[in-house]
Image (cartoon, rainbow, N blue to C red):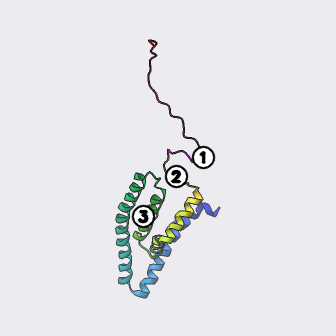
Amino acid sequence: MILRYLPLILFLIFPILELYLMIQVGTEIGAIWTITIIVFTGVLGGLLLRQQGFSSMMRVRESMNRGEVPALPLFEGLVVVIAAIFLIIPGFITDAIGIFFLVTPIRQWLIRHFIRFQQIKPSTRPDSPAPDKKPPKRIIDGEYTVDDDK
């Protein structure tokens, strides 16, 4: 029953927690430093989103040119984009989550477990047959005539 309302509860409680933490940090280090940190992580997230978006697109293209399914570069780029979005959202909790996703070993661990959970199997090409199966028969459509003049 409570799982049904979990997104609503998180949607209401999460911003309150972020504001509370910003106020607490502001009282400790000052409002100017708090705002500076929040703006800095937002700008960093925007730059990261821009740079990693192009980089991720290039890795996917290179993977496809090699004849591979670009699952890993796509997931890697997706996690980095999510991390950048978390950095853009103002708040210290979202910044911590964004930085957590940017740590390469953690990011790769998350991707491996997601792929294993989803049972995604990388292959060389989507149209290539599995090694233990025969390739599919190819049908060539065309016209022919029988020449009986031998």
Q: Residue furthest right?
A: 1
Callout 2 crowding tier (Cα within 10 Å): few <14, some 14–19, many ≥20:
some
Magenta range is 127-145
Quadrant (top left/top right/bottom left/bottom right) for the C terminus: top left
The disc at residue 79 is: none
3D distance between C-alphas at marks 1 and 2: 13 Å
Quadrant (top left/top right/bottom left/bottom right) for the N terminus: bottom right
Q: In terms of secondary structure, where does tag 2 sit?
A: loop
Please state if 48 lies on the left or on the right of 119 as rendered. left
Which three-letter amino acid code belongs to the residue tagged 3? Val
* Disc 3 target residue: 81
Which three-letter amino acid code belongs to the residue tagged 1? Asp
Q: Position of residue 25 (x, y in %)?
A: 44, 83
* Disc 1 target residue: 132
Q: Position of residue 29 (x, y in %)?
A: 41, 87
Q: On screen, 15 above or below 139?
A: below
